[in-house]
Image: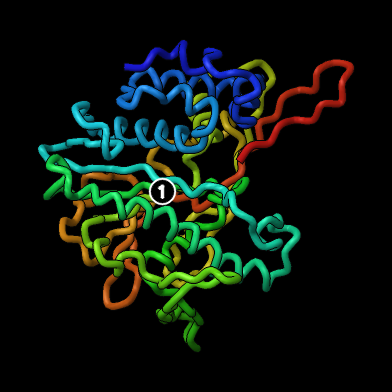
Amino acid sequence: MGDKSQLFAPITREDRLHPSFRALRDSVGYLPARRMMEDVFETYTDLDGNFVEQFQSTGYDSRVWELYLHAYLEDSGFERDLTHASPDFNVEKWFSAVCVEAVTVNPTQAPVLATERATDEELSPEEFIKKHEGLFAIKFGSSLYSKLKKEYWKLPHVAGRPLVFAIEDFHQTGSMTYTGTALMNYLYGFTYNWEWDETGELLVKPVEIGEHTYGEKRIPSGFFNVPGAESVSAVLFSASGTISKFGRMGFQKGYRPLGLRIIRRGTVHNHDPNSAMPHFFAYQLGETDHLETWAEGLSMFHNPRAACPVDRDLFPHIAHHRVDEGLIKSVIPPFHPYASHTLFLMPKPEGTAEPGQEAV
């Protein structure tokens, strides 16, 4: 098991620290997140032996995502097999084994188009749509295909078991809050047009995508149709496997520095079958009856061609999506946020003009 005192211990040179780690370590407003991460890390076994070093430096986003997945899997009743380090989580529940590999979408290192570097506020609506339909799908495709080439299903302890790729998008600040639709479109190779008929009933029509393009980049759509992808049972995605999640869960657990207020706002699934738009929500932690869980916000996209399908009942309290006759059929929890922003607000230190903090 992990030593919680080591997670933020200075084992990496200050000039090599990831800037997000430095902010997490030093900010009073992030104390709930630090304490919650330490508690989770205490139950985590580092099979690679480099978790803390990478968390503090070059692998910050990946390690945050892995720590979140560990928290969810453990909370859902899975027991981890510690005899194999790859894939990341070889777990069992109710005598059923599942293998889960963590995947992250990372910033592009090579030269990129100006629109790729631009923030979303700097783009026109047309440019943002092109970016959403093209670039975001391509980035998901690159990360998933890189994992596919590793052929985990050929490992003796993976063969014959469901294999799940669990992906989170960290390619730019806040990107996970608006790229989920691009992932779904890329996985199944369809987008959807919709309209209301004269009676007010919502009509949805699938439209085959074919390929995703952005500048000179292009990839075929439909990850689940790629040769070899039948060995991937499903793709798990969350827009909230981030520091903000740990902060909210920590605050909820009772880690509350004096004066800290946390406000969360975002979009949540609208269960009206004739609605094409989500609801908006906002609440202040501690001022509502809502209790967040590790499962909240997770979606599992099932592969219709899976050689070894994954049992939906093993992953309760999350959204499940399947394709049936060209349409996505979903089972959605009562409160399922698609995206949210979290504000961590601390009183200004006396005599300063330091603003409150905002994290995504």
Q: SS at mark 1? A: strand
Name the side, left or right, on which 282 lies relative to 333.
Answer: right
Q: Amino acid at mark 1?
A: Ile
Res 32 visible? yes
Task: Determine crowd level at label 1: few under 14, some 14-19, many 20+ residues with C-alpha closer than 10 A.
Answer: many
Name the side, left or right, on which 174 lies relative to 193.
Answer: right
Residue at (46% x, 13% y) in the render: 6
Name the side, left or right, on which 326 lies relative to 309.
Answer: right
Question: Does 179 appear above or below 218?
Answer: above
Report the coloring of the rendering. Answer: rainbow
Q: Quadrant of residue 26?
A: top right
Q: Which residue occupies the foreground of this view, 110 or 199?
A: 110
Question: Does 351 appear above or below 180?
Answer: above
Question: Does 199 appear above or below 22?
Answer: below
Res 333 visible? no
Residue at (47% x, 18% y) in the render: 7
Q: Which residue occupies the foreground of this view, 162 or 195?
A: 162
Count of numbered circles in the view: 1
Q: Quadrant of residue 262?
A: top right
x and y percent of residue 308 in the render? Answer: 16, 56
Identify residue for label 1: 167
Figure quadrant of the N terminus: top left
Q: Which residue occupies the foreground of this view, 81 or 317?
A: 81
x and y percent of residue 261 in the render? Answer: 66, 28
Residue at (42% x, 25% y) in the render: 51
x and y percent of residue 325 in the render? Answer: 27, 77
Figure quadrant of the C terminus: top right
x and y percent of residue 217 in the render? Answer: 53, 68
Residue at (43% x, 60% y) in the render: 141
